[in-house]
Image: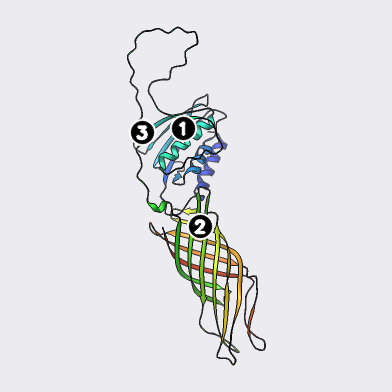
């Protein structure tokens, strides 16, 4: 493998885990111990990339790191025949011979076999290659070259030859249902800035639905109800109370895996609701409401606790579209909606 190829493979092994799926899914480590292919064939990093496009249950081991499964890939000089060998550490290796109309098809076919061997739930998608690729078990008998058109064959009787065929790969047990989830809910305390003077405590209730789960995409929709309220606020001219009730709609296109069981989601959000203030212990006290509309961004951190439960920490920053003022007559200001509002919430989530 060339120095450039080794560099590309190292970069892929380092950055690949960032584009994976939810935290509680178990992964198996894979080590590419040997990759031999003639000039013009895809490099080793391309083989690893094709596996990562099909499954995120495979984590690529770094050099000299122990792995659950070891893989060796070799392609002959014609570029149309390949040999794939893989096996668990300390056990006999399985082999498959792959043939195709081009070296790219051969390498892609071996990547598909590897992905399906390590993840039985892999769905086959042909991405960018057409043609026919055949998979054959490895045999100890060499393949005879085709006979010439006018050659005369001897009719000497021959004893049947024994074919030694590698045993099929044993099917894997189904993984836990948490490996692929489509919805989750959560509830927890919140702390908001911009819902009244100073910081305002509250709580949030949210629902997250997975819309699409692909290796490089994990599109999810987030719906949140947040209520922020605090007791009586004392100011020089009197006292007041504020309550904010908002609904937050968000879209989260990615989920990045930071470590096993720990991931983050960046989201775009829009808040809509009402901020209500009421005078207390003042003459002619009354209640007034302001409409709350605010676009913004949110970063969610998810930490897996068990098969179905996890913790989330949401940090949200929004820009209110209106900056209403709350005051005591004639002009004693109590609070003005700020230019930027913040919210932080910690929740216990459950997936199903």
Task: Between residue 32 and residue 143, name the one nearer to us.
Answer: 143
What residue is rendered at 42% in x and 47% in y? Answer: 27
How far apart are labels 1 and 2 at the CA level? 35 Å
Whether residue 332 sits left or right of residue 163 in the image: it is right
Q: Quadrant of residue 67?
A: top left
What residue is rendered at 42% in x and 44% in y? Answer: 121
Whether residue 99 sits left or right of residue 325 in the image: it is left
Spot occupied by residue 183 in the image (x, y as percentages of width and height): 45, 58
In what element is the residue under mark 1? Answer: strand
Residue projecting furthest to the right: 331
Residue projecting furthest to the bottom: 283
Tell me whether circle 2 and circle 3 mark residues in contact (CB < 8 Å).
no
In what element is the residue under mark 2? Answer: strand
Whether residue 322 sits left or right of residue 256 in the image: it is right
Which of the labelled discs sits on residue 168, or is there none? 3
What residue is rendered at 50% in x and 33% in y? Answer: 107
**Quadrant in which the C terminus appears:** bottom left
Spot occupied by residue 279 in the image (x, y as percentages of width and height): 57, 86
Q: Which of marks 1 and 3 is nearer the N terminus?
A: 1
Q: Earlier in the sequence, mark 1 or mark 2?
A: 1
Task: Between residue 260 and residue 3, name the one nearer to us.
Answer: 260
346 over 65 or under it: above or below: below
274 over 80 or under it: above or below: below
Q: How would you rate the neighbour count of disc 2 (Cα within 10 Å): few for under 14, some for 14-19, many for 20 or more? A: many
Task: Between residue 313 and residue 259, name the one nearer to us.
Answer: 313
Spot occupied by residue 329 in the image (x, y as percentages of width and height): 65, 88
Spot occupied by residue 137 in the image (x, y as percentages of width and height): 40, 28
How far apart are labels 1 and 3 at the CA level? 18 Å
- What residue is pinned by disc 2? 264
Which of the labelled discs sits on residue 73, or is there none? 1
How far apart are labels 2 and 3 at the CA level? 39 Å
Q: Earlier in the sequence, mark 2 or mark 3?
A: 3
């Amino acid at each position: 493998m060339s120095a450039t190829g080794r560099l590309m493979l190292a970069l892929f092994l380092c950055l690949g885990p960032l584009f994976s799926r939810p935290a509680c899914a178990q992964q198996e480590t894979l080590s590419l111990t040997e990759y031999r292919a003639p000039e013009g064939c895809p490099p080793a990093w391309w083989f690893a990339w094709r596996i990562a496009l099909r499954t995120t249950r495979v984590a690529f081991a770094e050099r000299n790191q122990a792995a659950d499964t070891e893989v060796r890939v070799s392609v002959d000089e014609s570029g149309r025949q390949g040999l794939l060998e893989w096996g668990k550490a300390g056990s006999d290796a399985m082999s498959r011979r792959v043939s195709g109309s081009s070296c790219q098809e051969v390498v892609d076919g071996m990547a598909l076999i590897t992905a399906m061997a390590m993840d039985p739930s892999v769905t086959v998608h042909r991405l960018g290659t057409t043609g026919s690729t055949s998979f054959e078990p490895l045999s100890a008998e060499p393949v005879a070259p085709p006979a010439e058109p006018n050659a005369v064959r001897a009719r000497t009787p021959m004893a049947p030859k024994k074919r030694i065929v590698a045993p099929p790969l044993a099917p894997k047990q189904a993984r836990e249902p948490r490996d692929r989830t489509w919805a989750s809910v959560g509830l927890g305390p919140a702390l908001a800035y911009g819902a009244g003077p100073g910081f305002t405590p509250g709580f949030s209730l949210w629902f997250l639905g997975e819309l699409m789960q692909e290796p490089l995409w994990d599109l999810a929709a987030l719906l949140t109800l947040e209520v922020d309220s605090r007791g009586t606020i004392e100011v020089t001219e009197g006292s007041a109370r504020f309550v904010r009730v908002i609904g937050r709609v968000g879209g989260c296109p990615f989920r990045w895996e930071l470590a096993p069981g720990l991931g983050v989601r960046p989201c775009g959000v829009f808040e809509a609701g009402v901020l209500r203030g009421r005078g207390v212990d003042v003459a002619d006290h009354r209640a007034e409401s302001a409409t709350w509309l605010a676009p913004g961004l949110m970063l969610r951190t998810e930490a897996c606790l068990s098969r179905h439960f996890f913790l989330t920490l949401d940090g949200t920053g929004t820009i209110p579209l209106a900056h209403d003022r709350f005051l005591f007559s004639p002009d004693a200001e109590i609070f003005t909606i700020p230019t930027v509002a913040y919210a932080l919430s910690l929740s216990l989530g459950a997936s199903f």
